[in-house]
Image (cartoon, rainbow, N blue to C red):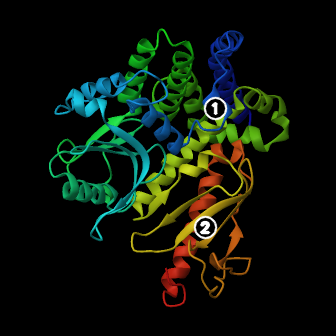
Amino acid sequence: MPTQNKNITSVLNEIKKKLEFINQANIEAYNRGEKYNIFEILGEKYSELAHSAFIANLLNPKGSHALGAEPLRLFLNNIGLSGWIDKDINNAEVNIEVAVNGETDDEWGRMDIVIKTNEKIIIFENKIYAGDQPKQLKRYKTYAEHHFSQNHTLLYLTLDGRPASDLSASNLQEGSDYFAISYKKDILNLTNECIKLALQKPLVREVLNQYRKTLEDLVEAHGHDSEMKAVFDYIFQNCDVVTQVFTDDKYLKERELILNVHTQKLFHYGLYHLVTELEDYSHNHGLVCNLDDILSGGRYSGFSFRREDWSKTITFQFTMPYWKGCYYGVHSLQEMKPGEKMKHFKDKPNSHYCYGNSYTNYKDWNLKGLISGEIKESIIDAIEMTIEAINQEPNKYIM
């Protein structure tokens, strides 16, 4: 026991030491007003749709920024896309959430950002936290080739510029069939260039400055170097020790040290960590995941897992805001006649949760559950119990 206590003490002392510098820097940033960020206040910091809308407006020659076509021209130059002449750039139409109304079964979906002229098209697939969908890039590529021949460009936008998974790209090759771009480099560079363009437009400039700060926070939290990330990494690397602080009341003062400093940021870092681990689990077990709502924490926000050939999903939702009341079941988007309840579910089937539903073993999420890994295990246990029930009686539990 003395060795264990010494271990806890040394870990906490190291955390405290790492936080001292950051605390002072945060106090100074707060006093300068740098903590005031409209994207975070409105809860849009993690929303892919909000980022798509902002980027689309910035690239729109007729966007409300009044910077004209120059942002689009800068962006095309920065990613090395030639072939767009001034007439194309000046007359480009930019839209979000564009439905793919193709003429074949291989042309469907909803494109996140589309930049289009009469003869050319650029299609963005924007992925911050959502998992790849089956043949998503392949479907957009088929649509673009069918309607724009060779005058198309397919961009896969992520925080760090990673290529698309095989699930989405199918047999497409990055660097020729589509191009991977990043928030960390390409969108951040565009924002910096537009800040310079907006020198004489103070309101536009300040919104762009706040967006730049939002981007910097996103890419740092996702895995790039920062002082705060070093602290969070250290806490999660010593999760066994830190978990003791949360479970044993004799460590109340030590617990207060962790909880009183950057609790919200640490919690969100834990959510990022959870998303990454669940993505890895999904890919290793042949599942398609959609995890973008994990970070929102809104009432009825949810996330899901499925196999490629399923029309239903194993869906998790929160009954209350701030990650409270996590329950799960087999979910159908279309209302259907309820089936027979799976044995491991407590609540009866309904028209959407067609085989019943139940709370997870860790229904109210908190920092302890994220650090200890108990939340992740409760999700994986729920998935595996449900898949086992499906595998045992596939004719009864049709997916």
Compared to residue 242, the image places residue 331 above or below, namely below
Q: Quadrant of residue 383?
A: bottom right
Horizontal side of residue 190 vs 4, given as left or right: left
Label 1 Cα neighbours within 10 Å, binned few <14 / some 14-19 / many ≥20:
some
Measuring 72% from the left and 46% from the top, which residue is drawn there? 366
Question: Label 1 sits on what residue type?
Answer: Glu
Identify which residue, 89 or 224, lies in the foreground: 89
Q: Position of residue 230 (x, y in %)?
A: 54, 25
Which numbered tag is attached to residue 382? Answer: 2
Q: Is residue 256 above or below residue 241?
A: above
Tell me how many marks there are.
Answer: 2
Is 21 left or right of 155, judged from the image as shown? right
Percent x, y of residue 18: 62, 19
Mark 2 or mark 1, earlier in chain: 1
> How far is disc 2 from disc 1 in space, using C-alphas?
32 Å
Q: Residue at x 64, y 53 (%)?
A: 375
Where in the figure is residue 139, as x and y percent of width and height?
A: 29, 60
Q: Is residue 352 above or below residue 232?
A: below
Instruction: Tell me the mark number nearer the camera, choosing from 2 and 1.
Output: 1
User: Is residue 3 at least partly visible in the picture?
Assistant: no
Which disc, if any, is residue 40? 1
Badge 2 marks a residue whose secondary structure is helix
The type of residue carrying mark 2 is Ala
Please identify the residue farthest to the bottom as the structure is shown: 395
Label 2, residues with CA under 10 Å away: few <14, some 14-19, many ≥20: many
**Circle 1 — which element?**
helix
